[in-house]
Image (cartoon, rainbow, N blue to C red):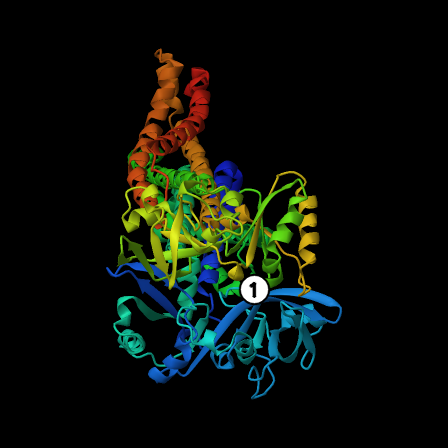
Amino acid sequence: MKRFFYSIIRNIKRNPFYSAINIFGLVLGFLSVFLISAWIKYELSYDSFHTNSKNIYRVHRYFYDPDGAENLHLQYVAPTIAPLLKNEIPEIQHIARVSHTGLVFRAGDKKILENNTCFAEPEILNIFDFKGLPNNENLLKQPLTLIISEKAAQRFFQTANAVGKSLDVKDDSGKKYSFVVQGVFQNWGQNSHFKPEVYISFSTYESIVGQEELKNWGSNNYETFALIPHMPKNINSKLDGFINKQFENGTEWTKIRLESLTDIHFNWYSSRSFIYILASVALLILIVGSINYMNLNVAMYTKRLKEIKVKKVVGASKKHLTLQLISESVFFCFSSVLIALGVISLFASSIDEIIGNGFHLSMIENTDLIAGVVILSVVTGVLSVLYPVLIVSSFKPVISGGKEKIAAGNNAFRGGLVTFQFTVSIALVISFLFVFKQTNYLHEKNLGLDKENIVVIPSTQQLNEKLDVLKQQLAQNPNIISASASKRTPSQGLWDSGSATVISDGSSKPLDFRLANINIDESFLSTYKIELAAGKNFEKFSESNAGYLINETAAKKIGWDSPEDAIGNQINYSGQVGRIIGVTKDFHYESLHIQLAPVIMMCRPENFNSLSIRITPFDKTKTLAFIENVWQQYNLQDNIFSYEFMDDRFNRLYTAEENIKQLLNYFMIIALSIAILGLIGLSMFIIQRRVKEIGIRKVNGAKISEVMTLLNKDFIRWVAIAFLIATPIAWYGMHSWMQSFAYKTTLSWWIFALAGVLALGIALLTVSWQSWRAATRNPVEALRYE
């Protein structure tokens, strides 16, 4: 064993540069594999910490046009579905409705906004894990009762012992309600799509909204979970039968389906394809590092031919030599894993910040991944060294020209390995540039509205009743340009819609497509700088506010040749007849993943819940303080002032794309770094093997440029082949990825060209530096070599 370690140390001292390149490449490879594996493990574990996670399902709902085309997919459903479905499908063991909200709770003198609050039926306790709750059959069954997490208990009371304590909430009129804490449950993991910190009894909610709301099939605002231990094979036909039982031919326009709890994260918030992409990238980076290791091991082992021949002469068998070289390689890879894990432990907190999304890297919680990477290091060590070991150990001790044969006989194989390295690197460069271009397109595309410098704050019934006074107060500040009230705001989904019939020339024509609605006031268009294509806007205190605005897409889908043709026609929308008074130019209310939808706009102040305030870019802090001061005058609930900037909300729509861009950037740099270092090492080895040839050529009159061309041409050919291979692969990958966007940039040819030129430039700079040194060396010194 002592001689084994001595041999390793001696070889590292003899070849410090090659050894450093090998270690660096392997460390980056194993580091990438571990980090990506940890992230994939985190993603795949979403919602899986519940005991019954494999048997928990969520009800979701589809809507269809008359031609059968899907026009809306909702993750929440109507409140009537849960109780009716429980009676219809006996396999459902438990089912519960949840209504999400955000409330300001008061615990003594403290006010705390808890956005992760919900009203939930008591059966939710039988579906999810709520460890630590007291054995109380009345949990969440009585009005004005709730349960909270340990984290919430600490925020409210600075102790987890909160049972029996009270939390106060004020309604819109300022009336106070006191809620009793019935239990405190253990904190859930961060990797969950469903993580309320406060659960209020659903009976409380029923007393607030009334039974009419809970019978409304159009109020798709309830997340509905079911525990089904034994899922029937014909569940979809049962669900269709249920809908058709409620509505005649109901499945022609709406359907409900069940999705597994553990699939929700990928169905709505992430993508499994992203996992496959990153897993592939991690594997490719490890292969790229292993190729360096394999190529440079050939270089290092040829320098050990004398040692190997001497060992053969004194009786060492081929098996013994092979075992020794493989053991050295495995030790080398294992050491690289230890270094990689040490780096990860050292920078764990920084890695958490980079990855974000609640990710927390804990070595203790990932011992399975550590074991996996250690095993991988052994496999990598064996596989990476097999080829060079087979070559070196096969030489006869009586042959003196072995190293020349190694250098000449395996050039094509080494070239293939370098080609693979640059194929991976070029494909990553192309992918990064396209993702970068697409994300820039998402942020910079003209949306038909101006999202910059708009502050969004919540509205209340008191604000709606005194909206004009509020606007006058805000207008007193020169940094406030305009203000608008609406039900929901841009960047949110177009979730509201109704039946629509166009009344024209005495005849009625039901629309055969979904017409989404937006509820706005007369200042909405000017606040968001949305332009009119024809007609006029809503007006203050005008009878025209009983009419409608539509967008250009709606006008075209209805069948009018121009926006002007739509003006004056009547629409019966959800039972309310009004004239079209204006047509707006198209604007993107939702993400650019989604095609522009036909939209109708109405002015119904009683439903407003948001205020959009356009401000100047100057003195934003003072302007926000002024807005808060005005808002507090109408804050009967004594709520906490909160606001968002509209551009931030739009940016959050593309968080996944930004994460892809960031990760591709990191791994592109890693892959290029490994490839460059490998190229440096390999070119040094090849040039050293040809020093004598270079000296002879120079003595015979070869120019420096001719010598450099001779040394560079193989590398140029390898990079060119890599570019030809990487281009169609990257094009196909990016083309497939961009299909998820309704609006996307073009797959520009110059990106492929730039990636190829960049790879070629890096290769030439890397190799030419050493080629120039070799070409300018005194030929007399070269001919003395060896």
The reply to whether residue 306 is visible in this rendering is no
Q: Residue furthest right?
A: 109
Left or right: 136 as drawn, with respect to 337: right
User: Residue 436 is drawn in which quadrant?
Assistant: top left
- All told, the count of numbered labels is 1
Residue at horizontal 56 percent and vertical 59 percent from the top? 360
- Location of residue 778 with respect to 114 vertically, above or below: above
Q: Which residue is mark 1?
A: 364
Q: Residue furthest left?
A: 67
- In percent of width and height, residue 579 lies at 38, 52
Mark 1 element type? helix
Q: Residue furthest top?
A: 701
Please rate how many residues cluster around mark 1, counting C-alpha atoms within 10 Å: few if below 14, some from 14 to 19, many from 20: few
Q: Nearer the viewer, residue 340 or 151?
A: 151
- In percent of width and height, residue 503 lies at 30, 56
- In percent of width and height, residue 698 lies at 38, 14
User: Residue 299 is drawn in which quadrant?
Assistant: top left
Residue at horizontal 65 percent and vertical 38 percent from the top? 618
- In percent of width and height, residue 404 lies at 33, 32
Q: Nearer the viewer, residue 383 or 94?
A: 94
- Location of residue 333 with respect to 88 vertically, above or below: above
User: Residue 620 is drawn in which quadrant?
Assistant: top right
- Location of residue 699 with respect to 589 vertically, above or below: above
User: Tag 1: residue type?
Assistant: Ile
The reply to whether residue 519 is visible in this rendering is yes
Q: Nearer the viewer, residue 57 or 370?
A: 57
